[in-house]
Image (tube, coloured by chain):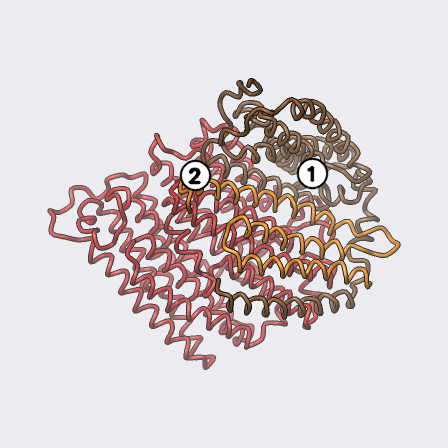
Amino acid sequence: MSRRASLAVSLLLGLLTLLLLWVFAQALAQQPGPRLAELAATELPRSAVSNPVTAVLLNYRAYDTLLELAVLLAALLGIWSLGAASPGYQPAGPALEVMADWVVPLLILTGGYLLWVGAHAPGGAFQAGALLGAAGVILRLAGHQRAGLPSESSQRLLAVSGTAVFAAVGLATLAFGAGFLTYPPDWAKWLILLIETAATLAIGTTLAAAYVGGQPPENPEGVRSR
Amino acid sequence: MDSLALAIGVPLIAALAAAAFPARAQALGLAGALATTVASLQVTALVWQQGSLRSEPGGWGAPLGLALQADGLSAALIAMTALVALATAIYASGYFRPGNRPREFWPLWLLLWTALNGTFLAADLFNLYVNMELLGLAAAALGALGGQPAAVAASLRYLLIGLLGSMTYLLGVALVYTAYGTLDMDLVAAALRPGPVAGTAMVLMTGGLALKAALFPLHFWLPPAHANATAPVSAALSALVVKAAFYLVLRLWLDVFTPLVTPAAAHLIGLLGAAAVVWGSWRALRAERLKLLAAYSTVAQIGYLCLFFPLLQATPPGTAREDLLAALVLMALTHGFAKSGLFLAAGLVQQSAGHDRIKELGGTAQHLPATTFSIALAGTALIGLPPSGSFIGKWLLMTSAVQTGQWWWIAAVMTGTLLAAAYVFRVLGQAFNLEPTPRRFLTQGRTELPALLLALTSVAVLGLAARPLWQLLQPGGAA
Amino acid sequence: MTAQFLFGGAGLVLFALGIWSFLVHEPLLRKLIALNIMGSGVFHLLIATAERGDLPPDPVPHALVLTGIVVAVSATALALALGRRLEEEDPDG
């Protein structure tokens, strides 16, 4: 882009920013009251979890989250469709090797903790899945061709599992007459935990597999050999 | 059973099955396509009976929960999507050669379908954002499937542009939530007060969607993306994906931001539409490749749909307005069927000749008579000759332009129609040469028949039997 | 109110900077970072909206942001994979 054009763009965007700031101030001024906060809080006891954000994600707006897991899957399928992964990094030196041995189990443990604690405090499937994904990234950096993941067919099952369990629960509640993704109150807590567990595994797998960046190599051995 | 949830749940489950078991992806994909068609047509049938449907996944209801909603407009588009996607799926099962069949086609295809149905049924502004991202990612991944550098580059650009559009849209949604404290479309519409906040939100959301709908002058990404993808994907991108973004603009302007739709705003959209009609048709005429021609023609067709905005704005509620809206939907459906038929046929030409350069297409008619016939039929619908659906659509468009005193839109329609006739006959003129007469009408039924049926639907079914569409769009249902 | 405006306003500035960078810069990586900054800007604004002084914050925008982040990660990953595929084909381009 030429210098003059980029100057014009800057000027226009500067004006746009001022306009947006003014509009945002107006929007804040015409406060609609508590928005959805009060409602989310009063319905919280019926949602089977005590962390309001988890209640929104997995109960009030669970359908959004179902589609979001599908988005993650679509990205992974798209990445896999582009061909095989690049060979990756050379085996790690001793320091990184030892660090990976320490950090990876710790990340998995913390992920499990965040998954469990998400029902009543900040945490949940996404935070836990992100930690699992990070463990995969570290393994890949330390020379693991498949980022610590199993074979391609197992990876497929894992990556699909989050969306599949979620959708299956939704269709099951529908089949039992309660409506799509409408959990029966007695079961809600366990159904949410089931969905979150599957989602954690799927998110972790998908993030790590996306980092590998292509169809997983057939033979991951030679992994740590130098 | 909740038919709205099924129209989304069925293709989603099928996509997951096809993703999990790649060895059986094609069988699972075809079965899923059939099941999704049934689920989608059930929605249309129920809307036909009851006028509109609403369901609340999660059971919380707006504003805390989410809702799905269907009326005549969404039901018509869902039915079109079902038929086009089913025909294209059957075509795809014969199009990809066993050796180089892309493994991820089927799961991505069904995810795309999930997102299309989800978009047509969504009643929540943020849910629409998630749906659009699913649509955009699945479409970009499908567009790159061939793996040719041109296709990958075009898909990458398409993905980036799509993201720019979604982010802009999302900023609009964030402003709406800040000002009105709800995301449900009906509740936002009820709470809306004309003013700078609502106006800015409308501009941001419309701008983001216009980028995705390839509304002139934001269309630059479309021709390479649609022309370089594999044939079944091009068909879906041009016939369905662009329509989904256009549908959202229409939905927002008609149902959510109603008080903000001023004559000036509607005229601006109309002007851009007119420019798209002329520019898209002109570029289609100048295109050297058949698929590029089809892609530029999509730019023009989106333009026709935009011409309805100023007319709808100027027409008071009543029969005239209902006719106009039905004409718009009729044109959108006709284009959907015709363009998917054209792209599928172009794919066969490309496969048979090894290229799709229009100048060197001589003899195609003799080699592939059924395909040439499909191209001719689809061309008839794109020009708007009787008895195609777009003939009725354009007729009502021009009648309304006279009635509301906005006669200048007629000039754009006439120019576009003449140019369309020129580009269609240019292709057909090249397809024939002096080789001996064809041996058989159909050479490869599995791929040629879907293309032929789609093109035939756009000309005969929609044109001669447009009446049910008017009944479907009646607010109270037809039955 | 002032804190809310400053936090959300910073988001708007990020959004505009993101658009600027997206339009002005040619390389894929810069465009992708620009898009992610735009996204962060919108998320900023949503988080600012959730703030309610001494009361517990509104959980709905928080959940929307979490969803948005996952969507943004997915899109970024796919775009990077497409870009790398192009680079393999044509290392100079």
Specify whether residue B465 is in view.
no
Q: Nearer the viewer, residue C20 or B377?
A: C20
Residue corresponding to mark 1:
A126
Rendering colour (chain A): brown
Q: Residue B331 at x, y = what percent?
A: 42, 62
Look at label 1 and name its amino acid.
Phe
Horizontally, residue C20 falls left or right of residue A178, namely: left
Q: Residue B176 at x, y = what percent?
A: 69, 61
Specify whether residue A200 is in view.
yes
Rendering colour (chain C): orange
Disc 2 crowd, CA 10 A, few/some/many (<14, 14-19, 20+): few
Identify the secondary structure beneath mark 1.
helix
The red chain is: B
Q: Residue B226 at x, y = what percent?
A: 40, 51
Tell me, for residue C88, which label it has, or none.
2
Is residue B226 positioned above or below B315 on the image? above
Identify the secondary structure beneath mark 2.
helix
Q: Residue C76 at x, y = what percent?
A: 57, 45
Residue at left 19%, top 42%? B440
Q: Nearer the viewer, residue A165 or A209?
A: A209
